[in-house]
Image (cartoon, grey):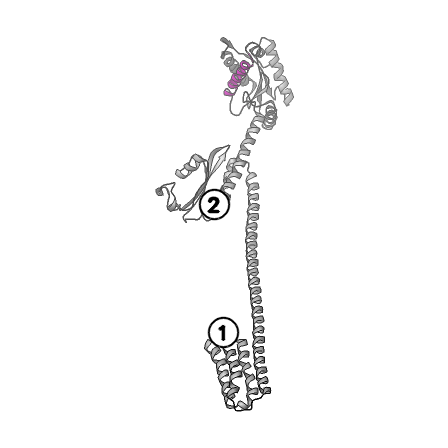
């Protein structure tokens, strides 16, 4: 394609000049040569220059009307009619070519507009595809994270102790943040950053230590250009911290903080569940008033002691203890006085036995003690000591000074009985003989 403007202008004028010379030289062939001016407009139909087209059209028309006046060939009405017809045909050609060019240009414009629209639609579709792919990646990452989080929850929830939770917590933190320094610890804050978290009970994110305004730059070590700390909350109290740090600034983002918060939340719930379970378990085997083991716990321990002593062919003793005239304390001084007596007796019993022995509140004002590896003779000595200690205890209820006594029944395995029910029955019978014999005594035969 010709792009030079000079060429586009010079060619039609060259054609015009050449044809004009031919007309001047061969005037007799005017009617044959003049239509050749149409070549100029055919040229313009490919390389349009509208202003130049009209100039050339005017010159060609002028040549058609003026040139024959100076010619020597014959003049006639028919000749003039042919000239007029050729000029009209020249104008008709100009019009048709111009109309075709306009239609072509309109087609090009419509095609260009359609191409532009299609390109725009293509770009929109590509943008939609990119957004979809981005959303798909984000969704897959979220599904992956939730799957890993679910596994983490199950992993941590399977822990049976607080220490096991801490070990698994450290493992999880190192898994999610393998390229940074990690620290999980319980206890008091170790520096100003942990103190800040402890005081506010909220996580701390430091993206760049050089831009941090909340802390002095001297508080940061060379390996701590960015830090994330989140508290480990246990029943609303900060019991420890999860800390990650990096020597690279801008290493951590808000998403990292959220991951740590989720992990800390899972651990906190698991630790609270374990503590609650331990508390419920303790309440299930211990009496709420005296903090001694319950009747049910006593039965289980007695069975274990019988099996262990039978295998080792060892003896052990059982003490059954009942507070004398306990109903009097409730009737005379009220139930609070009775509770005070029970707690005092329980305290004396627990403080007077070894760690390997077992003391329980058998029911009401009655207590039971299993003395591991102790024969009846030593058990009677301990029972006498307990009796004298209780007898010496004093109470003051509503200004009245009073005391407390207890009766004791002692049985020995395997001398007195070899099964649980018989061992308890023998000790109970001797206890009731002590109460029937005047109370505040120990019966062992």
Please name the residue that numbered disc 1 is placed on.
51
Q: Image check: 207 left or right of 314?
A: left
Near mark 2 (Cα within 10 A), the count class, few <14, some 14-19 or many ≥20, is few
The answer to whether residue 196 is visible is yes
Q: Image check: 245 left or right of 338?
A: left
Residue at (61, 17) in percent of width and height: 427
What range is drawn magenta here? 334-358
**x, y percentage for residue 42?**
55, 79
Q: Is residue 338 magenta?
A: yes
Please name the residue that numbered disc 2 is placed on.
254
Residue at (53, 32) in percent of width and height: 275
- Classify mark 2: helix, strand or loop: helix
Q: Is residue 46 magenta?
A: no
**x, y percentage for residue 56?**
50, 78
Q: Viewer-proximal residue, 343 or 68?
A: 68
Residue at (57, 68) in percent of width and height: 106
Could you tell me if the residues under marks 2 and 1 are in contact, i.e. CB atoms within 8 Å? Answer: no
Q: Main secondary structure of the magenta part?
A: helix
Q: Viewer-proximal residue, 149 or 60?
A: 60
Q: Picture quarter containing residue 190?
A: top left
Q: Viewer-proximal residue, 151 or 162?
A: 151
**x, y percentage for residue 14?**
48, 83
């Amino acid at each position: 394609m010709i792009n030079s403007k000079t060429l586009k202008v010079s060619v039609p004028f060259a054609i015009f000049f050449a044809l004009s010379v031919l007309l001047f030289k061969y005037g007799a062939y005017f009617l044959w040569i003049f239509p050749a001016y149409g070549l100029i407009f055919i040229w313009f139909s490919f390389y349009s220059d509208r202003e130049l087209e009209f100039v050339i059209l005017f010159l060609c028309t002028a040549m058609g009307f003026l040139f024959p006046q100076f010619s020597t060939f014959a003049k006639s009405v028919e000749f003039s009619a042919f000239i007029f017809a050729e000029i009209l045909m020249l104008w008709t050609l100009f019009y048709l070519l111009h109309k075709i060019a306009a239609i072509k240009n309109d087609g090009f414009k419509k095609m260009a507009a359609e191409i532009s629209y299609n390109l725009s639609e293509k770009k929109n579709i590509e943008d939609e595809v990119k957004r979809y792919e981005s959303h798909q990646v984000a969704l897959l990452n979220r599904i992956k994270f939730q799957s890993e989080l679910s596994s983490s929850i199950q992993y941590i929830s399977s822990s049976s102790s607080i220490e096991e939770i801490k070990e698994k917590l450290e493992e999880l933190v190192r898994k999610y943040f393998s390229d940074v320094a990690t620290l999980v610890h319980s206890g008091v804050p170790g520096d100003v950053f942990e103190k800040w978290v402890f005081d506010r009970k909220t996580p701390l994110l430091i993206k760049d230590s050089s831009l941090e305004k909340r802390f002095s730059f001297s508080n940061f070590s060379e390996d701590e250009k960015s830090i994330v700390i989140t508290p480990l909350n246990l029943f609303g109290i900060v019991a420890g911290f999860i800390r990650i740090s990096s020597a690279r600034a801008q290493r951590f983002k808000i998403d990292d903080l959220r991951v740590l918060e989720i992990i800390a939340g899972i651990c906190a719930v698991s630790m609270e569940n374990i503590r609650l379970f331990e508390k419920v378990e303790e309440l299930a085997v211990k009496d709420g008033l005296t903090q001694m083991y319950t009747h049910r716990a006593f039965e289980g321990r007695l069975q274990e002691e019988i099996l262990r002593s039978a295998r080792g062919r060892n003896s052990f003793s059982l003490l059954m203890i009942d507070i004398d005239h306990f109903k009097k304390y409730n009737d005379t001084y009220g139930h609070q006085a009775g509770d005070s007596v029970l707690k005092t007796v329980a305290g004396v019993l627990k403080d007077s036995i070894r760690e390997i022995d077992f003391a329980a509140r058998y029911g009401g004002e009655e207590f039971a003690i299993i003395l591991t590896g102790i024969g009846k003779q030593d058990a009677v000595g301990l029972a006498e000591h307990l009796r004298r200690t209780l007898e010496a205890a004093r109470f003051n209820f509503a200004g009245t000074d009073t005391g407390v006594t207890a009766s004791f029944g002692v049985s020995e395995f395997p001398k007195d009985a070899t099964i649980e029910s018989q061992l308890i029955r023998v000790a109970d019978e001797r206890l009731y003989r002590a109460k029937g014999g005047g109370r505040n005594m120990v019966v062992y035969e």
